Amino acid sequence: QVQLVESGGDSVQAGGSLRLSCVASGYTHLCMGWFRQAPGKEREGVAIIDSEDNTNYAESVKGRFTISRDIAKNTLYLQMNSLKPEDTAMYYCAAARIPLRRITSIQAFGMGRSAFGFWGQGTQVTVSS
């Protein structure tokens, strides 16, 4: 199994930057991603990195967010720059279901939440204007 623990959420002003971290334990080097959920909205995919380190992003964050991982540290990152108030949400780290561990980032984005079987507890990001 996989356990995920996020950190790095904070309150920042528009235009600022944050870096989220997610430490994974158990079965690692899966397809992994960051999702977010704002109050009253569906949880949406933000960025995904697959087992070949190919990445894919939601249109709303392209050019501003970067997903990466450090295999030696079993840590997934989300660097968020030029933050906007609409980025305010709870951010969740997720890992693909074991049978889907080798899916590509494009496939994972297409499947959305259903591709991911392991979730962290979330970290809050609040961006003020």
Image (tube, grey):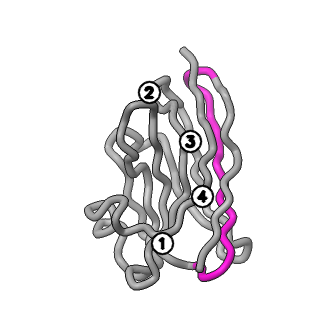
Q: Earlier in the sequence, mark 3 or mark 2?
A: 3
Spatial CA span between label 4 and label 3: 18 Å
The residue indicated by pointer 4 is 120
Q: Earlier in the sequence, mark 2 or mark 1?
A: 1
Name which residue lies at 70% across and 45% down: 8
Name which residue lies at 59% across and 47% down: 79
Look at the image and tell me in which quarter the N terminus lies: bottom right
**Nearer the camera: disc 4 or disc 3:** 4
Give the left or right position of residue 118, taking residue 55 as reference. right
Range shown magenta: 13-28
Q: Quick check: is 14 in the magenta stretch?
A: yes
The residue indicated by pointer 2 is 86
The residue indicated by pointer 1 is 53
Measured from the top left, where is residue 34 in percent x and y? 49, 54
Q: Amino acid at mark 2?
A: Glu
Asked which secondary structure carries label 1, the reply is loop
Q: Earlier in the sequence, mark 4 or mark 3?
A: 3
**Nearer the camera: disc 1 or disc 4:** 4
- Using the rendered view, name the quadrant where residue 38 is placed: top left
**Nearer the camera: disc 2 or disc 1:** 2
Q: Amino acid at mark 3?
A: Met
The residue indicated by pointer 3 is 80
In-front residue for pair 85/63: 85
Spatial CA span between label 1 and label 4: 20 Å
Residue neighbourhood size for the residue with mark 2, other residues' Cα within 10 Å, grouped as few (<14), some (14–19), many (≥20):
few
**Nearer the camera: disc 4 or disc 2:** 4
Asked which secondary structure carries label 2, the reply is helix
